[in-house]
Amino acid sequence: MRYQKLTVENFLVFVGEQEINIPDKSGVVVIYGRNGKGKTSLLNAFRWAWTGEVRKRSTRPLPLEDITNKVALAEASGDSVRCRVRLEFEADGAQWDLTRSLIRKGDEYFTELTLRRDAVALSAADAERKVTELMPREIEQFFLFDGELLDQYEKLLDDDSTAGSTLRDAIERILGLPILENAARDSARVAEHAGELVAAAAKRDSKTKRLGQTLDTEQTRLRAFRQNYEAEDQKAKDLEAESAQLDQQLAEQSGKLEIKTRRDETLKRLKEAKAQCDAAKEEFENLLAESWRAVLVEPIEARIEQDAKALEATEEQLDELRFAATLARHCKAMGTDTCPVCESRLNFENRAALEQHLQSADSSELSAKEDKAAALKASLKRLRESGRGHELRANLKAVEEKYLNLQQKIEDYQDDIDDFEDKLKGQDTGLTELVQRSKNVSVLLRQAKAAYKDEWEKYEQAKKNVAKLEEQIRKTGAGQADPSVYERQRTAEALADLYQKAIVIYRDQLKESIQEKATELFQSMRSEKDYVKLAINESYGLRILDRSGNPVKHRSAGYEHLVALSLLGGLQASSPISGPLVMDSPFGRLDDHHVDGVVANLDKLSSQVFLLVHERELPRETARDLLRGRMLAEFELSRGASAHETNIQELHSV
């Protein structure tokens, strides 16, 4: 396929009818434009012509009512306005003219697709079918390259990534594998149908009637299992595509999702802080019920000191009184002339002193002192129990500080939440639904894959059962079908087996070819000479290998870019479907050295490359020097009369 001319009319930033004429030869067309001047709009012009879809700087589609140029709509003053993209190209030895239009009048609009082959218009149905055949929607990303969406190619390295699985299926579509897969499936169905005729013949013969009925039942199960696993396989593919789309939407909303996550975490902390604050308040109130203890700390301590001294004095007096009581008991036992301690004879003075002690012991003073000591002890016990004032004061202070700190935390959390809410601006519900939808799809996808595996195993077992029954019928020699039926069955089964083997061989050959071509391209663009090779995985993801043959685990964003470009070149060189490559912002992650390497090898990516860049990415003189005779034309996108108008100007053409 080779593009010859692109015409845009009132499409996005392009007012009126404007053209890009392309020389009819291989090479590179460079289109310069500053930011906001229409480079991505041109990429979308090609995309809309082929798929009827226009995208923002993401995978999300732009509503069709928004693609008509605003200036043209304003000048129409309510009259109808035509928005149109026309692409003229050569493919399969024929001249094609593809035009997609949108006619808008006020808030109403309708679209139209026309396709001419060698100036002969195709019917609407044939036009849709042929456009899909020429550029299947699943593979347009390999011909319309947006450098801002490079991360999707990195997902090919993740064997568990649904986005990687979807991209892998798209790659195999561009490589032509579905042709073999459909052939294998059709051959298996032909063999199944022949088996049904074998069962019908067996049921007509009395000798094999029961075997024929059993075979018929097993064939019914076989068909059911096949239909089930095909349905689950399709369901899994649909869910993978939906999951990839949701993953992309989540990636686009990563900033908002991060804010939402932080908001949700802050809400959780706020709830915990409020619960802790309520608990601290309750604890504080309980402590306040005994706060009188804290007020009476000093008076109670003074009373404790006073009573303790009084108790000490009383106990000293008690000791003397008890001693006197002991002497009195001994004296009564021994008489008053003898000392009850040393048993010596007492003189007059000693006897007088002893009599005085004995009189004390006989009085009620001892009992009174004992009562006083007991009362003081009880008082001290009560005072000490009610005198935990210092501990209570410390607890009150700690709980109060905790309560005030929690109050401040709650205030800070609430301020943060208000800030997060302002940034989310009502998107919370949509983000929550998006995340939940993604989780639900992931669950359904796992279930579909598990169901597919289960139904496939049942199908394989049913095939073995059918083969055994058919062999039993054949051995009886009765109830045989027409020989042509058996011949058809054997041929179909052999073909199905052959196609299955061919799929494996072809897939391996394609991977080897892609790896070889991509490595050649990578080697011509990379600056790090220790990066010697690219290795392909089962999902067509490419890894860089160093001189020791070890994968480079932490490659830079720039090298991710080079690997993605190498993959595109490998696919173009290995695929039965090839065509022009339109590249928007392909140098965003590359340094000057690698930009030069990529530009010098652009013609190796595809026979026809359209490069959409601004001059700071690629100065004009640098482009001309690097491309030399391979540059087909240069165009510039410049501002018109307003920010909504861009003019296409041809600078140079061979």
Image (tube, helix red, strand yellow):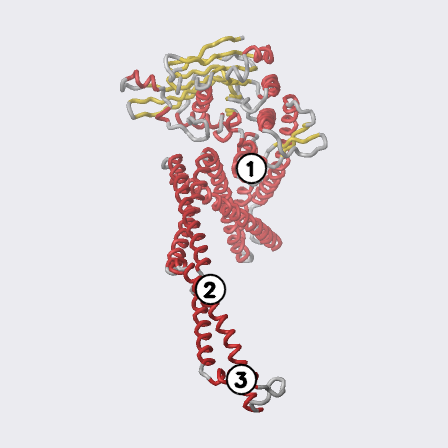
Chain-order first, disc 2 or disc 1? 1
Label 2 sits on what residue type? Answer: Glu
Closer-to-camera residue (29/350): 350
Q: Is residue 50 visible?
A: yes
Relative height, residue 514 to residue 2 (above, below):
below
Relative height, residue 650 to residue 60 (above, below):
above
Q: Are marks 1 and 3 in contact (CB under 8 Å)?
A: no
Q: Is residue 200 visible?
A: no
Name the residue tied to disc 1.
181
The image quarter in which residue 49 lies:
top left
Residue 352 badge? 3
Q: Position of residue 600 (x, y in %)?
A: 61, 16
Q: Are marks 2 and 1 in contact (CB under 8 Å)?
A: no
Closer-to-camera residue (93/528): 528
**Secondary structure at numbered mark 1:** helix
Alpha-carbon span between mark 2 and mark 1:
101 Å
Relative height, residue 614 to residue 430 (above, below):
above
Callout 2 crowding tier (Cα within 10 Å): few <14, some 14–19, many ≥20: few
Alpha-carbon span between mark 2 and mark 3:
39 Å
Q: Are marks 2 and 3 in contact (CB under 8 Å)?
A: no
**Secondary structure at numbered mark 3:** helix
Residue 305 badge? 2
Q: Position of residue 434 (x, y in %)?
A: 42, 40
Alpha-carbon span between mark 1 and mark 3:
135 Å
Q: Write the residue at 45% across / 24% down.
A: 47
Tag nearer the camera, 2 or 3: 3
Q: Write the residue at 48% across / 42% down.
A: 235
